[in-house]
């Protein structure tokens, strides 16, 4: 009845990276600050772009994430790329065409916008890839708890992580039982049974939620879920890189 | 003399009008074990949810150790009565096994160190100590069941209530579970369809059918009475013969 469990959401790689031993709250905060400073940097300022690129590259190197895995996960960047490649054909209206490509004008503002989006999206996504590669999802929740996120959000997140596998497995079993009774999924016309199954799953999920709650109440639940304290190292390098990233951003604002 | 657990004329109707329990009365002495047998939908699970003060109006149809089931006693009652639910996935919700087992004791006011000590002890009792830092969804069903039991034992209950603990277990896991339960020095209420298990753990059983208690007596006598068994949709496993037990 209970089949193999899916581990659909395990992004973290267990390896020797120093980043793996750091406290998740510092990693989350550093990622957030660096991504924000990258987002606010100006594409026409080469100093900013090069320093941010160096910081991101250094962090990727520290993470020891295999190139293949990194590139595979970077594919999440594709929607941004698709959006960005149309931008050079657009202008803000001051007719700043740089050259013509198959009778289509390429504009400078568009080109800059495209480079900005490509750079910022790729750098931001890379930071996200590194964070999830060197931090388990439980640690991310723990880190967010340390960063004083409201306990209700922490609870929702930890429940999601705990039950997503249960839910996926349950849905797989439902589908297998449908298939074993001759159901073949072929295009949109055959989706009705899946819709019914999804409805049933929703109700089952709701009922399970109720049962989980009952079992918590019976063990004295009073509204607080606290994760055990864990031990981590601190890294001055990460703090330094984050500071540099912010300083690079601020220096430009003052010029 | 007052009994440890006293239930008198307990009745419960679900909000949709379905009357799940109808005039349930029974007592239990401290340290005794009781089997609750009966067909599907008889009201067994509804009954045990009352023992923990989860369902039912707070009234005096239940008394535990001379404690009334009133709002003020609720925390003490839940600490004293530990319920192990049917589906361990409903019970294990924390990211790691250890955190889950510590959930109860922490809520009941044990210090962090005491909670940790209790949790490790409880995990030792069920032989799951080396899985402390595993995520519950990485465990097998039998392991989850053991952790669910540990998560209740860690709060040091005086009365352990188990809902179908042997369902979906392989024979060895079932045997381990029975050995664990026999090794405990507390009262046990065992809700089960596994009649040989009830016979092994509980000298006395009640039979619930249609929301009422239809029988209350020595487990072995209930199981050897064909009429009672048929009337309550009970059946021993094929090939299981009780008269062998008499000869021993």
Image (cartoon, helix red, strand yellow):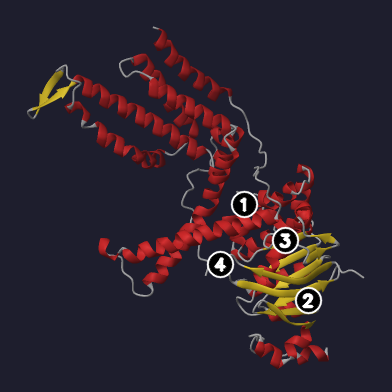
Instruction: Give the mark nearer the N terminus: 1 vs 2.
Output: 1
Q: How many marks?
A: 4
Tag 1–tag 2 contact (CB < 8 Å): no
Nearer to us of marks 3 and 2 is: 3
What's the chain of the residue with tag 4? Answer: B
Q: Secondary structure at mark 1?
A: loop
Q: Which residue is mark 2?
A: B202
Residue A21 x/y as whole percent: 59, 35
Badge 2 local density, few (<14 within 10 Å), some, or many (20+)? many
For this orientation, the residue located farthest to the left is A103
Q: Which residue is mark 4?
A: B16
Q: CA distance from mark 3 to mark 1?
A: 29 Å
**Residue A242 position (above or below residue B30):** above
> In the image, which is nearer the foreground, mark 4 or mark 3?
4
Residue under disc 3 on the same chain as residue under disc 2 = yes
Judged from the image, the secondary structure of the residue bearing numbered disc 4 is loop
In this view of the protein, can residue A187 be seen by the observer? no
**Which mark lies nearer to you, 1 or 2?**
2
* Disc 3: which residue: B52
Task: State whether residue A49 appears in this view.
Answer: yes
- Indicate the position of residue B228 as horizontal and vertical percent values: 70, 89
Task: Identify the residue position indicated by label 1 in the image.
Answer: B134
Q: CA distance from mark 1 to mark 2?
A: 33 Å
Q: Are marks 3 and 1 in contact (CB under 8 Å)?
A: no
Quadrant in which the C terminus of chain A appears: top left
């Amino acid at each position: 009845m209970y089949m193999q469990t899916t581990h659909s959401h395990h992004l973290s790689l267990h390896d020797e990276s120093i980043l793996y031993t750091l406290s998740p709250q510092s990693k989350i905060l550093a990622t957030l600050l660096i991504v924000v400073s990258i987002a606010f940097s100006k594409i026409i300022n080469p100093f900013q772009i090069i320093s941010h690129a160096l910081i991101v590259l250094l962090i990727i190197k520290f993470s020891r994430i295999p190139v293949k895995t990194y590139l595979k996960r970077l594919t999440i960047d594709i929607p941004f790329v698709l959006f960005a490649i149309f931008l050079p054909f657009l202008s803000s209206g001051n007719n700043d065409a740089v050259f013509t490509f198959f009778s289509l004008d390429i504009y400078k503002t568009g080109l800059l916008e495209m480079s900005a989006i490509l750079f910022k999206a790729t750098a931001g996504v890379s930071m996200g890839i590194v964070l999830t590669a060197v931090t388990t999802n439980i640690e991310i929740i723990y880190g967010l708890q340390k960063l004083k996120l409201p306990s209700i959000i922490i609870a929702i997140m930890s429940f999601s992580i705990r039950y997503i596998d249960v839910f996926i497995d349950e849905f797989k079993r439902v589908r297998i039982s449908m298939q074993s009774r001759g159901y073949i999924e072929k295009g949109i016309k055959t989706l009705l049974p899946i819709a019914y199954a999804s409805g049933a799953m929703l109700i089952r999920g709701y009922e399970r939620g109720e049962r989980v709650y009952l079992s918590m109440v019976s063990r004295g639940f009073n509204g607080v879920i606290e994760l055990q304290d864990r031990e981590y190292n601190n890294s001055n390098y990460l703090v330094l890189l984050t500071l540099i990233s912010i300083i690079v951003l601020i220096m430009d604002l003052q010029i | 003399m007052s009994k440890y657990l006293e239930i008198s004329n307990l009745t419960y109707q679900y909000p949709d009008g379905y009357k799940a329990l109808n005039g349930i009365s029974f007592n239990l002495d401290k340290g005794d074990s009781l089997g609750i047998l009966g067909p599907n939908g008889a009201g067994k699970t509804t009954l045990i949810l009352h023992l923990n003060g989860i369902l039912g109006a707070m009234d005096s149809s239940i008394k535990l150790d001379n404690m009334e089931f009133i709002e003020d006693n609720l925390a003490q009652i839940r600490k004293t009565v530990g319920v192990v639910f049917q589906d361990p996935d409903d019970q294990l919700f924390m990211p790691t096994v250890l955190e889950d087992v510590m959930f109860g004791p922490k809520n009941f006011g044990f210090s962090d160190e005491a909670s940790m000590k209790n949790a490790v002890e409880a995990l030792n009792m069920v032989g799951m100590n080396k899985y402390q830092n595993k995520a519950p969804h990485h465990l097998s069903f039998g392991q989850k069941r053991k952790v669910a039991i540990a998560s209740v034992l860690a709060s040091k209950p005086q009365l352990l209530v188990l809902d179908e603990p042997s369902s979906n277990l392989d024979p060895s896991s079932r045997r381990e579970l029975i050995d664990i339960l026999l090794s405990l020095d507390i009262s046990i209420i065992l809700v089960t369809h596994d009649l040989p298990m009830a016979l092994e753990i509980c000298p006395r059983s009640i039979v619930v059918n249609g929301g009422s208690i239809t029988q209350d007596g020595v487990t072995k006598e209930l199981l050897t009475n064909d009429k009672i068994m048929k009337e309550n949709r009970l059946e021993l496993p094929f090939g299981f013969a009780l008269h062998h037990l008499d000869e021993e």
